[in-house]
Amino acid sequence: MKILCKFFFKLLKLAAIIYGILFIVFYYDLDGKFLYYIWEPFMVKRFDNMKRADTTTTPYSMTENVE
Amino acid sequence: MGFSFKDIKSKYRELFVVEKPRNEKDKARDLKKTVHDFWYGKPHEERRLGDLYVGNTGLYKHREWRGFVDTMYYFNMIWLYNYGHMVSDIIKYGEGPGALVDFLKGTMRYRWMGQTYLTAMHWFDRGLEGSRGETLRASAWHYRAMVSETVRQITRMFQCDKKIHNGEIPEKWNKTIAHNETLSGNIFYGFRDNLDDVPLEMVPYFVSVHVNNHTVLNYIDAAQSLGLPADPCPMCQAEYGLFVHDDYPDYSPVMLTSNEACDGSVATSVLQDWFLNRPLYAMPQPMRYDDPLVQKHCQKEIEGAWKFVEEQFGVKMDWDLYVKYAESFNKLTEFEWEKWDVAANTPSYPITGVAQALYRIYYSQAGDRPIWHEVDDRVRRIMNKTVGNKIETFPKTRHRAIAWSCAPLYYSHWCTWAYNCWGINCVINMDSLMFDQYLRTDTYEHALEDLSWFNEKAPMRAMAVGGHEHILSLFDYMERFNCDMVIMYDQLQCKGMQGIHGIFEDEFRKRNIHAIWVPHALPDKRTVSRAEIRGIINDYMTTVMREEPLDPSLLDFDDSMSW
């Protein structure tokens, strides 16, 4: 019983620490700062350098007459 | 390259420290007031929300302290809840954790996904700035529904996308209908249990601009890089720019298009026909939509769309299914009318202008989905509380405004700013009032007639480019919603609306109405910036209305690089 209580107390403590850290991330907008200063520039670079198909080479044809 | 302690300190100050105005610094600390502000939040006039921004980024040095209860609600029920549900929604709509892999592949493949949608919580922040109590709760639920439906569409697109599956045809590719975002999801109710429909540009273009307006500029530039003209509606440019940029998911064997909102969309259909190179059904609506002579034609167009889907997928249109979903959708319409009634006749309407507008246009365009009903039930409970207890939801209202014509997508949350800064409460807007059509299901003929009317009352058509007599219905709605001010959107690249500018000027003068013209270029913030829009409203409020701002820190700030 004592071991079980100890385990739950530890679990509760861990949950409280995670909750506290998440609140700090939320309050100081750390998610926004990460996405703005780190994630977005990385993705922009990736997409700017991505090889893309030349869609203008797609043939344009009609299979049916327009009524 | 090294960093000195001074650099780190200055970066820390830039990112985290809110500088107090000089008069605040000199004040002696009042412990009682500090405790009061901690628990209830600062009074509106003392908030200084503009001081929270980091430079021109729109980021916050720290998120707003709304009082203990509302801050904890925001943290638990908005921030944590939505981050958590974004993941669980992918698993739910993707029918298993495997959908997370497709989601990751799509994030790394498509600019509109990888660059845009992870910033969704800042979309909430901008739209809910300054909100408190029941307004915060009801408006946030609207955003939650939009996020959930966006995740549904993204998940379905990625599940079926040939491009992220090495060109192989995924199982659901042959069970998914692609259509223009301006073609209502209502059309496909009769196929809903066998096929699913996903509007092609809704998530890659329309919603993305609201969440993070950086991405769309690539598509506009891509469209013009072909030598296509730069002066058509930038919405149409962005829609076909997706194809020029090869940034559209290939998730369906067919495409159904529409000429909504205007003739610019006809060009989009032609270009999509070229780039997609697959069976395409165009379902145009007449410009003078309410001409009795065109009604039969519109109904035939819908039947033609059903026939097209039947032929392409080998699935019969099921009348009973149509009835089931149309009747379910009618419940959303009934609640919408209830909301309008509360907005028009009481000071207890708990939804911000931006949440009202985006939610309404999203669900009525996408069609019936369970998430809209879940959210409406929650909002109904909140609204019953505010009305029952006579809670004044926007207590600093100085002016009740109606917003007319189409809004700047990159600044749809201007109304949140306008209330916080000037007490301008945007009660209703044109986009919310469209699709005002109940769908009868008693007979096939009635159903077809109403479905046709519903589509004719689509964005812009019913009250903008569909005939000048309709757009002047602004004044009837102004009276109905007890408004004393008009925010008149002036989409600089909309030829239809530009042509009618003078008539409005005359009417405003004749009727002695306070109207503020807000120029913009729909998704393109480079033409008219958000700061310029605020400057125009500030000028009107100081020079014409001779009013003082509620929060002076919001008068002038730089958010040019903000999402």
Image: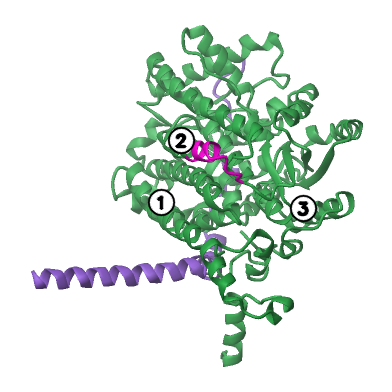
Chain colours: A purple, B green
Q: Is residue A47 left or right of residue B92?
A: right
Per the image, label 3 sits on a secondary structure element best described as: helix
Q: Residue furthest front?
A: B32
Q: CA distance from mark 3 to mark 2?
A: 32 Å
Residue identified by numbered label 3 = B533
Q: Where is residue B200? Give x, y as percent.
A: 52, 38
Q: Categorize mark 3 by other alpha carbons within 10 Å: few (<14), some (14-19), many (20+).
A: some
Q: How many marks?
A: 3
Residue B383 lies in the magenta stretch: yes
Which range is magenta?
B382-393
Q: CA distance from mark 1 to mark 2?
A: 16 Å
Q: Quadrant of the N terminus of chain B?
A: bottom right
Chain letter for the residue marked with disc 1 in the picture? B
Residue identified by numbered label 1 = B86
Q: Is residue B201 visible?
A: no
Circle on res. B237: none
Per the image, label 1 sits on a secondary structure element best described as: helix
Q: Quadrant of the C terminus of chain B?
A: bottom right
The residue type indicated by label 1 comes to Met
The residue type indicated by label 2 comes to Trp
